[in-house]
Image (spheres, grey):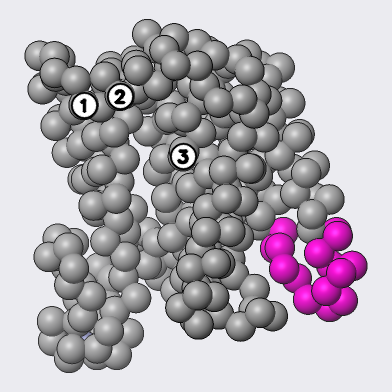
Amino acid sequence: MAPRYQLDLEVPPLDWWLFVIDRLFGLPSLQDLIITPLWATAGWTAGLYLGRLAYQLPRDEPFRFTPLCSACTARIPLIQLPLRVHCRTCGAALSYDRLEWPLGAIFALLALVFGPTGTLLAYSFDSIVLLISATIDLRHRYVYAIIVYPGLVGAAILSPALTGIGWVSTILGIVAGSTVFGIFYVAGRLIYRGGEPLGKGDIELAALAGAMVGFPRVINALIYGSMVNAAVILTMLALRRLGKRDFIAYGPGLCAGTLITFFATS
Ligand SMILES: [Zn+2]
């Protein structure tokens, strides 16, 4: 079991870092050699279907139908080369995200760090919800209630049941996340009259982060999320891919911040 640390907004103690480094780079145990590849494969397989859901849902197409190229209606196969982003038939660029690779990698990391524990199960569920929310938000700037609310309920049950954070911490996390982002949302509407720098979906994602990591770690998640977004904005400004008045989707960075919190403060 990982050494616990409770302090919020402080750098984790040395023994925590040594534990993580040892789990990631130390000699693998027999358990690692069996559990990690198995779990990575499970994540990769789940990611195949998650990518299909991320493609079909914004198009109002049923999940059970094979996704089609929007240019020529050729079928998009479930399994394809990782970097292939063009239609095999007409060559048009596909807005299809191959989520099996990131989800497989996240599952492998979770298995390495947490081993076969309840925490692994809860964080794996959470990662699926975060990855699809971030993917759809990035492409469509939309957070689907049909994903975020079942995800919120699932996380609110799994976090106290499996990860060792209490019910109170979980509920406080939901309240804190949605309150902080509710304030940001109103402030954004007032500052950019008519504009909406943060969407209502960002409030839901902040509540989701709270359900996954509880209070006070939700504050870490929000701060890591801001840091990820700041890094993305600065990079895009440096590459001149972004005007100073452009808004970027805030949600994907927030999802990444929550994922970082799983590892950084456990
Ligand atoms: Zn095509």
| Residue with the mark numbered 2 | 21
Residue 69: x and y in percent read 27, 81
Is residue 207 or residue 69 the one in the foreground? 207
Residue 257: x and y in percent read 53, 44
Neighbour tally class for label 2: few under 14, some 14-19, many 20 plus, Cα within 10 Å: few
Circle 1/circle 2 CB separation < 8 Å? yes
Q: Gap between marks 1 and 2, in whole Å?
A: 6 Å
The answer, for residue 161, to whether it is visible in the render is no
Q: Amino acid at mark 2?
A: Ile
Q: Which residues are magenta?
A: 186-200
Give the number of the mark in front: 2 or 3. 2
Q: Is residue 199 magenta?
A: yes
Q: Which corner quadrant of the figure contains ligand 1? A: bottom left
Q: Is residue 46 magenta?
A: no
User: Quadrant of the image for the N terminus?
Assistant: top left
Q: Earlier in the sequence, mark 2 or mark 3?
A: 2
Q: Earlier in the sequence, mark 1 or mark 3?
A: 1
| Residue with the mark numbered 3 | 259
User: What residue is drawn where x is 59% and y is 38%?
Assistant: 221
Whether disc 2's CB lies below 8 Å from ligand 1 is answered no
User: What residue is drawn where x is 40% and y is 21%?
Assistant: 17
Neighbour tally class for label 1: few under 14, some 14-19, many 20 plus, Cα within 10 Å: few
| Residue with the mark numbered 1 | 25
User: What residue is drawn where x is 24% and y is 43%?
Assistant: 104
Q: Secondary structure at mark 2?
A: helix
